[in-house]
Amino acid sequence: MIRNIDFKICFSVIFLLTIFVGLFQSWGLALSILNLCLISGIMSMGVNIQWGFAGLINFGVMGFLAIGGLATVLVSVPPVYEAWAAGGVGILISGLFLAFIIFTIFFINKKLKKYKYKSYLVFFIIIISIPLLKFISGPSISKIESINAATSGFLGGANLPIIFSWFVGAILSAMVAFVVGKVCLGLRSDYLAISTLLVSGIIITIVKHEEWLSRGVKNVIGLKRPVPYEVDLQKSELFIKIIEFINFSKLSKNFDPEVNANLLNQLVISSSGVFVKFCFTIIFLSIVLIILYLSEKALNSPWGRMMRAIRDNEEAAKAMGKNVVKQHLFIFMLGSAIIGFAGAMLVTYDGLFTPSSYQPLRYTFLIWVMVLLGGTGNNYGAILGGFVVWFIWIQSAPFASVVINFTTNHLDDTSLIKEHLFNSVPYFRYLMMGCGLLLVMRYRPEGLLPEKVIKN
């Protein structure tokens, strides 16, 4: 009963805060925060599946988010035919060579398990393959990156609807997680955390510097979106008539046609942005509900009970005949797929792919804070943590500005103290985030919504 009350109170507060932002700031900002909270909720659910269900520490969240973001480029961007003609064949040959190397390594690991020098053989193959791969792909990469370097300089994508990239991002993330899991899941938990963090760094480095694939730090802008564009809405007669009907009372107060026309134009421009964000909200909310439903079904299924048993007592699960390594690999892939899915959603919402924006603080540790603050092992807690942390992250600066302005109102504008406090506003988010986490860890160490104990 208490948990049910906690659930209602927490999400009611989040709902009211979103309404207050809409009323006192703007509805566009409120919907923007809500959309990012929904995406953050999906990210934290992916981490929660790995950590809360199986006890796997994945500090490579940023890398899987970047894979999802890269998928939007590979799927939705039109292909650059000149680049494909210049070096496409060389890239395809390099891809086949890389696939052959990966297959060879897996074959050696599987067939030569008892071979004394197996590790040395794998290491030798990897060392030899790196210069060979560079030799094969180097000329093609140079040709591709020289094709209209200012506007393209990469191969482009498949020119498909961007919503397909969300699923492609999940698949690519799961494939990378399979390779990483095969190598790292046998390690102890602290080594697993370090390994996944290093793998994440490798992925980000590739995305930043392989311009033929992602344009690197030049960024990819103007990505497709699954909702209308503001410019198209502003030209739509139907949309203009709807806005005119909704704001009839405002427009009827003025009798000057020119003033009314300017007011209507401003209302259409502002409303178009709000409508686009609202469309994103509907899509993102639907995705959150679907993933939440499937996660809850999995958690309450025999498989979910088995995963919690493995998490709580791995040795006992092994004694019962459970393949712990196989189950860990599966759930590691599943959580990474959800994270990659969220990464593609985030880039779609932003409308651009910027590899340099992937920073560990924002895209790894902040997401872990969401999981820990919301409550590990609880999907609702993971979503709540995403909402709470991201809301504080966005609104801490405006809140700090109001507080500083109120407390220093008696000081002159030239006061050094007042100037210093206002210059420090961007850093108040770290203070508020740290204080909030400390309070939760002190009074609710299991999170705002702790894991439910299921009694059979």
Image (tube, rainbow, N blue to C red):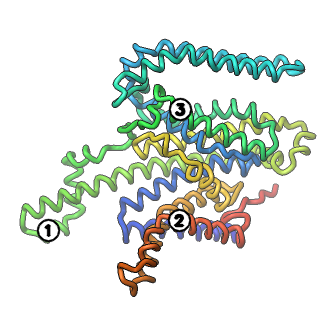
- Pick the residue in front: 449 or 157: 157
Instruction: Identify the element where label 2 is drawn.
Output: helix
Check disc 2 and report the residue beneath it.
429
Tell me which residue sits at (51%, 53%) in the image.
38
Q: Quadrant of the C terminus?
A: bottom right
Tell me which residue sits at (57%, 68%) in the image.
431
Residue 65 screen position, x and y as percent: 56, 42
Residue type for callout 1: Ser
Q: Is residue 385 above or below residue 328?
A: below
**CA gap, disc 2 and disc 1:** 44 Å
Disc sitting over residue 252 in the figure = 1
Q: Is residue 46 visible?
A: yes
Q: Earlier in the sequence, mark 3 or mark 2?
A: 3
Task: From the image, state whether disc 2 or disc 1 is nearer to you.
Answer: 2
**Residues at circles 3 and 2 in contact by the CB criterion of under 8 Å:** no
For residue 169, side relative to residue 59 (left or right): left
For residue 365, side relative to residue 274 (left or right): right
**Residues at circles 3 and 1 in contact by the CB criterion of under 8 Å:** no
Q: Is residue 12 above or below residue 340?
A: below
Residue 104 screen position, x and y as percent: 72, 16
Instruction: Identify the element where label 3 is drawn.
Output: helix
Check disc 3 and report the residue beneath it.
168
Instruction: Estimate how packed mark 3 is, as few (under 14), some (14 to 19) or many (20 or more) residues with alpha carbons within 10 Å.
Output: many
Residue type for callout 3: Val
Tell me which residue sits at (45%, 73%) in the image.
420
Numbered circles on residues, count: 3
Instruction: Estimate how packed mark 1 is, as few (under 14), some (14 to 19) or many (20 or more) residues with alpha carbons within 10 Å.
Output: few
Tell me which residue sits at (69%, 30%) in the image.
179
Q: Earlier in the sequence, mark 2 or mark 1?
A: 1
For residue 387, side relative to residue 117 (left or right): left
